[in-house]
Amino acid sequence: MPFPPTASRLSGVLIAGLAAWAFAGPVAAQESATDEEEAEAVIPFALPQSGPFTPAEIDIDNDQAIADWFRSAHANAAAEAFRHWDDDGEIRAACATCHSGEGFRDFHGLDGTEAGVVDGTIDVGGVVDCGTCHNSGLADITEITFPSGLVHPVQGVEASCLTCHQGRTAGIDVTEATAGLPVDEPNAELRFINPHYATAAATWLGGYGAAGYHYDGRDYSGRFFHARPVASCNSCHEPHTLEVEFEPCLTCHQADAPEDIRIARQSYDGSGDTSVGIRSDIEANADRLMDMLVAYTQEVAGAPVIFDGTRYPYFFSDANGDGAIDMVDGAPVVYGDWTPRSLRTAFNWKLVTADPGNYAHNPQYSLELLYDSIADLSGPLGIDMDALGLLR
Ligand code: HEC
Ligand code: HEC
Ligand code: HEC
Ligand code: HEC
Ligand code: HEC
């Protein structure tokens, strides 16, 4: 079958019904619709006029794809990623591209409006629906622009994954915010720069995608080409369940689970342990980086930070150094003492950890960003990099 299948090739009635059912779409509100048409449009699964009447005997087109998708994160209408704007009544243009199928279509001009901008009001209540990926218009999208400014060529449904899983900021934003500022001096003008969430495509493109903060004079591994059968998002992720099927990995790898896969014969985290997956090295270095970042804010910047992954914007003040987040009027005090050095290392830490699949998407690039950020903090902290035994 052509790739990807277009909406018109899927069951029309079912898709219309599905839209009404899942998104309370205003199908029935069309003025010209007759009563009969209306009734047909709002009932998701019309009962047949004659047999068979046993559900198991009734053939439903696309039922596997629908069932798989319905249980996936893309269809989870209750998730924060889709409910965040409920109180506003509409999704802001800056957010709508990735937080609703309708916003995605608007951004890419698939709804007939101008491409490259969300110019309509986007209703709350949408999810990543069928028409986000099954849309004949996707074939006309030939490139996707990343937050770093990189314009990357795409083909077919890849355009969808790369639009929404690219993150929202890049190292260049950190460079611009900190240009010309003394590197270890707290600056109240600086704010944490969040790479955003599920930034798989950014990690995947590596140094070529330039999502990370890149240090002068350092080279960064580019896109993770991996191996031919696993070279695209959907070659690993089933596009409806979104799950990674492990079986095909075993053609080339020997491991009990994806996170246990390792090719590298050397240890990157100083542990010397090469019996564990490469994910373990990335995690250990990320933990070390976070510890050093906290120590740096205490010992060098003189303004201790506390990281709390459960609330935005994640970094809070602990001015008196008592180990608890400072509160004013019952609200946590957002950290406002960033130095250029703490800001860029925090950015790289967050970028790597914002992608739970970093070890499969681009292990080398993840390790390089962590190593360089650790080295950056080691100087002012007086830590001997050689003694840590890390590899880049
Ligand atoms: C480039 C695409 C993109 C844009 C633009 C975008 N987001 Fe997101 N956002 C995502 C993705 C992908 C996730 C899913 C992360 C996950 O939960 O796996 C997400 C998750 C979230 C979450 C849930 C975080 C959590 O902890 O579950 C919030 C809240 C959010 N975004 C807010 C915003 C806001 C506010 C804007 C606009 C100012 C915005 N996003 C713009 C892609 C985007
Ligand atoms: C995130 C993107 C995405 C979403 C959302 C999505 N699909 Fe798909 N779908 C794909 C891709 C990619 C393929 C091609 C798979 C292949 O060829 O291996 C596909 C294939 C299919 C197929 C062909 C048979 C199969 O399962 O491979 C059907 C039918 C289908 N989708 C129906 C749907 C329906 C119905 C929905 C909504 C309930 C939906 N899809 C939502 C990406 C998506
Ligand atoms: C319109 C934006 C959009 C598109 C297009 C999109 N995604 Fe997503 N994706 C999201 C959001 C938002 C979430 C988080 C949803 C949630 O929190 O329930 C997500 C979640 C995921 C997850 C996490 C699943 C989990 O169990 O947490 C995976 C994997 C994923 N997407 C892969 C893909 C792939 C592969 C494609 C392309 C075929 C794709 N996405 C296309 C927005 C998108
Ligand atoms: C080599 C196989 C492979 C490729 C290629 C791949 N992924 Fe992944 N991905 C994984 C593995 C393994 C995980 C971690 C295990 C998991 O979450 O299922 C993961 C995790 C994710 C997650 C986080 C899921 C979660 O639990 O929150 C997202 C989102 C994601 N991938 C999207 C993508 C996108 C978008 C692409 C294409 C740019 C892509 N992946 C390419 C294997 C792959
Ligand atoms: C056709 C062979 C092949 C398949 C299939 C394959 N891989 Fe790989 N994988 C490789 C090769 C080759 C490398 C080394 C690539 C490199 O370093 O450039 C690698 C490297 C990796 C690494 C990094 C290991 C390290 O120590 O740096 C991870 C993680 C990984 N693969 C995960 C997966 C997952 C998950 C799957 C299944 C979804 C998978 N691979 C399927 C060939 C394959």
Image (spheres, rainbow, N blue to C red):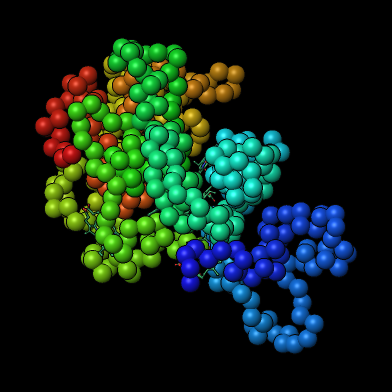
Quadrant, the C terminus: top left
Q: Would you identify the image quadrant in which residue 221 lies? A: top left
Q: Which residue shows up at 38% across the image and 62% down it?
A: 235
* 258 is higher (above) or lower (below) than 204: below
Image spot of residue 357 (x, y percent): 36, 50
Task: For residue 309, say whether it is visible.
Answer: no
Farthest bottom residue in view:
51
Q: Which residue shows up at 51% across the image and 34% down it?
A: 311
Is 268 on the left or on the right of 318, as rendered? left
Of the pair 186 and 240, the residue shown nearer to us: 240
Task: For residue 11, say whether it is visible.
Answer: yes
Q: Which residue shows up at 41% across the image and 60% down it?
A: 234
Is 137 on the left or on the right of 45, as rendered? left
Q: Would you identify the image quadrant in which residue 299 lies? A: top left
Of the pair 230 and 348, the residue shown nearer to us: 230
Image spot of residue 304 (x, y percent): 37, 20
Q: Which residue shows up at 56% across the image and 59% down it?
A: 136
Of the pair 100 and 53, the residue shown nearer to us: 100
Q: Count the marks.
A: 0
Farthest left residue in view:
386
Of the pair 247 and 234, the residue shown nearer to us: 234
Image spot of residue 343 (x, y percent): 36, 24
Image spot of residue 257 (x, y percent): 31, 62
